[in-house]
Image (cartoon, grey):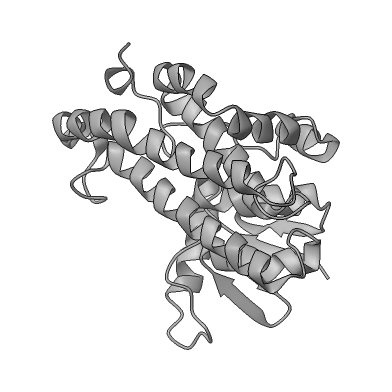
Amino acid sequence: MTYKLYYWPHIQGRGEVVRLALEYSKSKYEDVARNISDPDSARTLITEFLNNNNGVNLPFAPPFLIDGSTVIAQAALILYYLAPKLNLVSDNEDERLFAHQIQLTVTDFLMEVHDTHHPISNSLYYEDQIEESKKRTINFIENRIPKYLKYFETILINNKKISDWLVGSQLSYTDLSLFQIIEGLRYAFPYAITKLESKFPRVINVRNKIRDIPAINAYLNSNRRIPFNTMGVFRYYPELNKK
């Protein structure tokens, strides 16, 4: 069975944490919209699916995954569903629930990243809210990034299995998502993250270990990994990244 992942074809966005899990596990999947050569047609395909009033378990927005007759939306829920199948979470219920809790926190963090460049409204262009973005980003860099990274660092310190991973004794999908966070911060807020990384050595160790996994390294160096750009969740704008 081939999983079908639906997400916008031109950005990593919220779908990337799902891609990382599928790539790490070497699962067969189709990145449906990216397999359509015309970007407009790809976006239309997703929009028509979302607008199907007769659809069962209709998603609100991408990413969503189709596995046979099962349709699942929301990145955290997709990973919760996939992880047992891909051996990316423990069989222990407490650890499985804790992994989901961490992933929901990742979702919160990604929303805060998004709000640095769209603090007023998604319907406005970034250029329409630059001054508000500057104010939002100052607080995000000074307060929110350190708070989230401290949370992840504390989880790693407190892991009773004495592993290098967030949950239990083996890599889980949450570690792959933490990797994506660090990669995104390095792109979007390079000056800020450079000053912070030394304070969170266990978080950076997770990032480094995942980078060296052959399946992940191959993916990162392939054309399947969409480069970061100023259309996704993590965006680099010089005016938001002054030293």
Is residue 81 toward the left or the right of residue 219 in the image? Answer: left
Q: Nearer the viewer, residue 79 or 8?
A: 79
Is residue 148 toward the left or the right of residue 136 in the image? Answer: right
Q: Residue at x 27, y 19 (%)?
A: 239
Give the residue at the far top of this rendering.
243
Image quadrant in which you'd find residue 98: bottom right
Is residue 207 toward the left or the right of residue 59 in the image? Answer: right
Of the 4 image quadrants, the one containing the N terminus is bottom right
Q: Nearer the viewer, residue 187 or 232?
A: 187
Residue 12, placed above or below residue 74: above
Q: Residue at x 75, y 44 (%)?
A: 163
Q: Residue at x 26, y 50 (%)?
A: 122
Residue 76, placed above or below residue 131: below
Of the 4 image quadrants, the one containing the C terminus is top left
Image quadrant in which you'd find residue 91: bottom right
Residue 36 in view in this figure: no
Q: Nearer the viewer, residue 128 or 220?
A: 220
Q: Residue at x 74, y 70 (%)?
A: 92
**Percent position (x, y) of residue 96?**
66, 67
Residue 195 in view in this figure: yes
Residue 141, placed above or below residue 55: above
**Percent position (x, y) of residue 84?**
76, 68
Residue 234, placed above or below residue 5: above
**Percent position (x, y) of residue 34?**
63, 50
Number of numbered discs visible in the structure rendering: 0
